[in-house]
Amino acid sequence: FCSGMDLDEALEHGPKGELEVHERLFTVGTRLTKPIVAAVQGPVLAGGIGLLCNAHVAVAAMGTNFGITELRIGMFPFVIFRAVAAAIGERRALELSLTARVFQTDEALRIGLIHQVAPEFELDDRASALAHTIAGHSGPVTALGLRSVNEARTLDKEAAGALARQLRLEVFRHPDYAEGVAAFKEKRRPAWPSLQGEPQA
């Protein structure tokens, strides 16, 4: 998967313009309104944890190793820390950052860093199945949901509530919601208008 940045290059050339690039890379999950599904196999260390924490859903192969290992080389995970804390909680993220220990899939699953574990030979199929499941839902409504989650992070409680109410009203007026309710009542799969090329409200 990913074991972080090229240490020799960082030591020789310094961060230069990479800080802004890294900031955007390790916050991409907080901006996108299309879900990211990660299939993880191999070492997930340092910056690799930052990438993983920007995925909305993550599946890992058995035997995958994880670790926020920056302190082992005299660095702190400044850029990825917020994404890790959002994924697993600040106190757990801090413990993993301070100990710099490497751990396995069972612990990663238990603390919510990943959502499923699969045998290595099933990893791609499992991740693809999850992606297809998510893609089978209403795309516009999913996007509104992710927008709500993303924007609420920067709002106070009252503003976050107002945003949720506003987006909920948008969903109530969306043709996909009407189709979803009709399909539920008729015990059939929804045929989302947003996927049929019909005009949107």
Image (cartoon, rainbow, N blue to C red):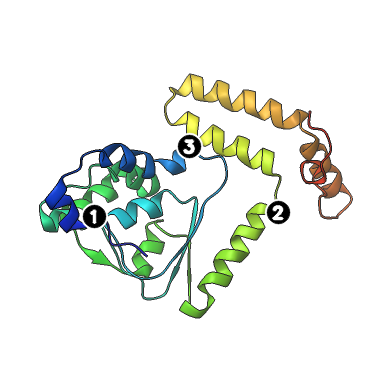
Mark 3 or mark 1, which is nearer to you? 3
Instruction: Label 3: state its secondary structure.
Output: loop
Q: Quadrant of residue 178?
A: top right
Q: Residue at x 63, y 28 (%)?
A: 167
Name the outermost residue toward the right. 186
- The residue closer to the viewer here, 92 or 124, is 124
Amino acid type at circle 2 is Gly
Q: What residue is pinned by disc 2?
A: 136
- Residue 79 seen in the current view: yes
Instruction: Label 1: state its secondary structure.
Output: helix
Q: Residue at x 62, y 65 (%)?
A: 129
Q: Is residue 144 left or right of residue 40?
A: right
- The residue closer to the viewer here, 181 or 33, is 33
Q: What residue is pinned by disc 3?
A: 31
Is 35 rendered above or below residue 141?
A: below
Amino acid type at circle 3 is Arg
Q: Looking at the rendered structure, which numbered label has been put on residue 96? A: 1
Amino acid type at circle 1 is Leu
Pointer 2 or 3: first along the chain: 3
Q: Is residue 152 left or right of residue 27?
A: right
- Residue 75 seen in the current view: no
The local crowd at label 3, few if under 14, some if 14 to 19, many if 20 or more residues have their Cα within 10 Å, is some
**Disc 3 vs disc 1: Cβ atoms closer than 8 Å?**
no
Location of the C terminus (image quadrant): top right
Is 75 rendered above or below residue 129?
A: above
Q: Position of residue 134 (x, y in %)?
A: 63, 53
Q: Position of residue 6 (x, y in %)?
A: 23, 57
As measured in the structure, the alpha-carbon distance from the residue carrying label 2 to the one carrying label 3 is: 21 Å
Instruction: Label 2: state its secondary structure.
Output: loop
Is 142 rendered above or below residue 62?
A: above
